[in-house]
């Protein structure tokens, strides 16, 4: 009998009349931590979404985006207040107007400024979330997949809130205007909150696509 190996990894051999035992240490860990083809380690699952959003670095980026939108909302609302209180159209008709007619011209002017500004909100928001997506892609120290999540979630929430809150505040500054007819019909506006919410969510989805797309470009082609 030249040699035998026991179940415990001990190799016993009888060579030259002497007994010799060699111990072979078994592989540690068994199946744990085995790396699968492609380099993906199933023993290390990805970060949970809740953990990702509660991460300090992630929150810095999200707070920065929401803070930027908050500053813009306050600034736009303040602009509406100041324009209504102190502003007047720079181009006027060359004839004397009564005080009532001057008031109507002022109201039309304020009405057009508020309406145009509120209509431009989504485009302003897309510019902001585009910049946010670029910052996430180039400065957030997370794996690419987590960068996309942070970029999309932040842009969706930020842009949707920005459009909803700013439009709601701006609607309080839209004056009632006269139709100019002899009957003196006054035209007012009413805010449809449900439709505003739907519009805000739609703009938020578009913002998420834009932001995640910019992040993808920055991490893919800017390396």
Image (cartoon, rainbow, N blue to C red):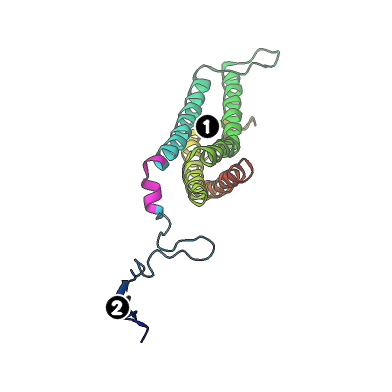
Q: Main secondary structure of the magenta part?
A: helix
97 relative position to 30: left or right? right
Q: Residue at x 49, y 66 (%)?
A: 36
In front of the other: 104 or 157: 157
In front of the other: 42 or 166: 42
The magenta span reads 50-57
Indicate yes or no whether the magenta region holds residue 56. Answer: yes
Q: Residue at x 62, y 40 (%)?
A: 222
Q: Please identify the quarter of the rendering in which residue 210 is found.
A: top right
Whether residue 8 is situated above or below residue 76 in the rendered picture = below
Which residue is most to the right? Answer: 94
In front of the other: 45 or 60: 45
Indicate yes or no whether the magenta region holds residue 30. Answer: no
Q: List the residue tagged with mark 1.
A: 174
Quadrant of the drawing holding the C terminus: top right
Mark 2 and mark 1: span between their CA atoms? 104 Å
Quadrant of the drawing holding the N terminus: bottom left
Where is residue 172 drawn, in percent x and y? Answer: 47, 33
Dot 2 surroundings within 10 Å: few (below 14), some, or many (20 or more)? few
Where is residue 151 drawn, in percent x and y? Answer: 51, 45
127 relative position to 166: left or right? right
Where is residue 161 drawn, in percent x and y? Answer: 47, 42
Q: List the residue tagged with mark 2.
A: 18
Q: Residue at x 43, y 64 (%)?
A: 42
N-term mark: 2 or 1: 2
């Amino acid at each position: 009998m030249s040699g035998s190996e026991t179940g415990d990894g001990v190799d016993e051999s009888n060579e030259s009349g002497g007994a010799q035992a060699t111990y072979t240490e078994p592989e540690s860990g068994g199946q744990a931590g085995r790396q699968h083809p492609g380099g993906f380690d199933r023993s290390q699952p990805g970060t949970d979404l809740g953990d990702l959003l509660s991460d300090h670095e992630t929150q810095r980026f999200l707070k920065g985006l929401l803070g930027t939108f908050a500053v813009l909302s306050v600034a736009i609302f303040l602009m509406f207040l100041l324009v209504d209180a102190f502003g007047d159209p720079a181009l006027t008709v060359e004839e004397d107007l009564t005080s009532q007619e001057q008031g109507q011209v002022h109201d039309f002017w304020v009405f057009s400024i508020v309406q145009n500004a509120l209509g431009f909100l989504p485009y302003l928001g897309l510019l902001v979330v585009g910049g946010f997506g670029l910052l996430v892609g180039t400065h957030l120290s997370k794996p690419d997949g987590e960068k996309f999540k942070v970029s999309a979630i932040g842009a969706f929430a930020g842009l949707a809130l920005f459009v909803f809150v700013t439009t709601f505040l701006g609607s309080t500054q839209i004056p009632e205007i006269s139709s100019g007819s002899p009957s003196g019909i006054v035209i007012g506006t009413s805010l449809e909150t449900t439709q505003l919410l739907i519009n805000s969510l739609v703009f938020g989805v578009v913002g998420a696509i834009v932001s995640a797309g910019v992040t993808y470009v920055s991490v893919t082609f800017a390396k």
